[in-house]
Amino acid sequence: DTGVSQDPRHKITKRGQNVTFRCDPISEHNRLYWYRQTLGQGPEFLTYFQNEAQLEKSRLLSDRFSAERPKGSFSTLEIQRTEQGDSAMYLCASTWGFQETQYFGPGTRLLVL
Amino acid sequence: QQPVQSPQAVILREGEDAVINCSSSKALYSVHWYRQKHGEAPVFLMILLKGGEQKGHDKISASFNEKKQQSSLYLTASQLSYSGTYFCGTESNAGNMLTFGGGTRLMVKP
């Protein structure tokens, strides 16, 4: 059983460019979460999916951010017109049902120049 | 609102014990504890559900005081491998997202 995987692991981009990250959850996990983590801080919730439905979005998720989970499998997080403040580690986690552990992927570290 | 963790940092010698606390101002359904090493993903340690159940495995255990909305993580006879940043994540309802504290940086020295 493979864990949560994320791609790419690192991304350097120039301000104003668009970036897209991918998360592949543990197979058969129906819930998928996106978090953002800046240096020295705990992860901050961005959004989550149950199957293909996006159930909740944080106020942190501006209109430049969009997430999808087509067919309830992998998910993508896109950031349009990146800003330097978007530089962070973007973490994906998955779980099955309620009262269950959220398993985190290795993260995508984004640096916006 | 973000739970508050204390202490913010602690340095131990191998074999010493430590307690990390997590307090919330909101009613909680569960508390999740994770350890994260530099540059790596958070690794799950344990979940505590409301009901005051204490859990543990090996030399790491935790408790959840539902009345006080507080959880404590107990590390006994610390090992070098325990070094890292410990986060508590709180859940107000089943299946919701986790709200993480600011972390406690633990360093275990030989």
Image (spheres, coloured by chain):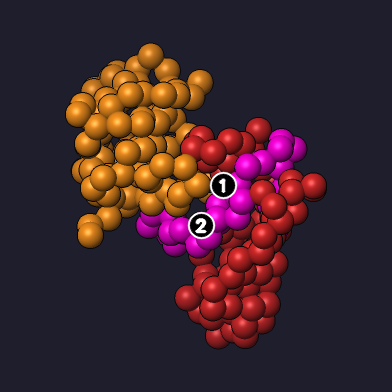
Note whether residue B43 is visible.
Answer: yes
Q: Is residue B60 above or below residue B39?
A: below
Q: Does A64 sit left or right of A85 as displayed?
A: left
Q: What is the CA distance from the residue labelled 1 to the residue labelled 2?
A: 8 Å
Which span of residues is magenta-colored?
B21-49
Tell me what residue is drawn at x 66 percent, y 64 percent.
B54
Q: Is residue B26 above or below residue A59?
A: below
- Residue A86 in picture, x, y percent from top left: 39, 30
Residue at which label 2 appears: B34
Tell me what residue is drawn at x 23 percent, y 60 percent.
A1
Tell me what residue is drawn at x 54 percent, y 38 percent.
B94
Relative depth, front residue between B37 and B33: B33
Relative depth, front residue between B47 and A60: B47
Query: Which residue appears farthest toward the top when viewing the image?
Result: A63
- Residue A75 in picture, x, y percent from top left: 25, 33
The amino acid pointed to by label 2 is Tyr
Numbered circles on residues, count: 2
Q: Which mark is residue A24?
A: none
Give the chain letter at badge 2.
B
The amino acid pointed to by label 1 is Gly
Mark 2 packing: few (<14 Cα in 10 Å), some, or many (20+)?
many
Note whether residue B88 is visible.
Answer: no
Q: Quadrant of residue A6?
A: top left
- Residue B103 in picture, x, y percent from top left: 59, 52
Is the Cβ of the residue at disc 1 closer than 8 Å to that at disc 2?
Answer: yes
As for residue B76 lying within the magenta part, the answer is no
Secondary element at image label 1: strand
Residue at which label 1 appears: B89
Q: Colour of chain A?
A: orange
Q: Quadrant of the C terminus of chain A?
A: top left
Q: Is residue A85 above or below residue B51?
A: above
Relative depth, front residue between B89 and A85: B89
